[in-house]
Amino acid sequence: MVKFTAGPASAEVYSLGEGPIWDAARQRLLWVDIVAGAVSEGVLDDGMVTATRRHTFGSTVGAVAVSEDGELIVAGKETLTRVDPGGRRTELARVLPEGARSRLNDGAVDPAGRFLVGSLAQDDRHGEEVLARLDGTGLTYLDTDLVLSNGLAWVGDRFYSVDTIPGTVWVRDYDADSGKTGPRREAFTITDGKPDGMCADADGNLWIANWGLDRVECRTPAGELLATVETGAPHTSSAAFAGPDLDTLVITTSIQGLTGPGPGDGRLFTAKVGVRGLPTPYWISK
């Protein structure tokens, strides 16, 4: 197993940094601060991230994605909102009932441009959370029995998704052209720490942030641990490959729940890990 070390890459500290994505067309990084209800934009240069713009919302923000022409889709507490390049906002879909004791969490775009997003409970309910998909025909619910829906990634014709509390990484066959999915089955379970955000690399392996173990883990689709990227931040939340060559792993962290945050907690981190990521698909907004 290979061990890498990530270094702090942002001056700003985020309450619950999450969901980094790379927008290649505009050479920018996007990420969210869930608790602050904010989407940030920034530039990546020599391993450092400089924030350049911030969009704030009146609720939590679980995830962000971008279209080819620069429109954003933002997962608020219960709904999905389009933000055009000029900042105008339009509600697209309600995923959760109004006043739900849940909120939207991690999201991602599938290879055909559909946006998927999951939810988590904000009380002690278990097994009632959803994973939903938005396309031109509306919303489809792929799962309705999750505990804490989290990271999403596609490797070839397979779709991987994380349910954090049981530590399960699910897999199903996924036809991107038609949107048809096969039965969900367990790919593997992580019992040490809590799997959180996730991305895939060009070799077909998964990079999974481990909340509680201050690291990102590289695992095969069968769960074999190949490498770790140590951050020193206990609440490591998500990861994405970024940069012109997709060879920089950008990692988000959180200060949420820490009684004495360390100097790196809540910052973005970066690392070179010897592999490249897959291009981030663009959300098809029309």
Image: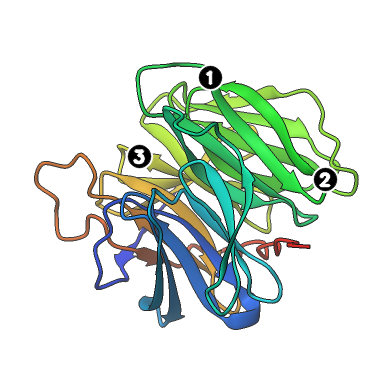
**Amino acid type, residue under disc 2 in the picture:** Thr
Mark 2–mark 3 Cα distance, whole angstroms, equals 35 Å
In this view, the residue farthest toward the left is 260
Mark 2–mark 1 Cα distance, whole angstroms, equals 24 Å
Q: Is residue 193 above or below residue 104?
A: above
Query: Which residue is tagged 3?
Result: 211
Disc 3 packing (10 Å; few <14; some 14–19; many ≥20) = many
**Amino acid type, residue under disc 1 in the picture:** Glu
Disc 2 packing (10 Å; few <14; some 14–19; many ≥20) = few
The answer to whether the residues at label 2 and label 1 have Cβ atoms under 8 Å apart is no
The answer to whether the residues at label 2 and label 3 have Cβ atoms under 8 Å apart is no
Residue situated in front as seen by the camera: 19 or 76 = 76
User: Where residue 214 sits in the image (x, y, percent)?
Assistant: 30, 45
| Residue 1 visible in image | no
How many marks overall? 3
Query: Which residue is tagged 2?
Result: 137
Residue situated in front as seen by the camera: 115 or 60 = 60
Query: Which residue is tagged 1?
Result: 128
Residue 209 is left or right of residue 184, and the answer is left
User: Where residue 13 sits in the image (x, y, percent)?
Assistant: 24, 63
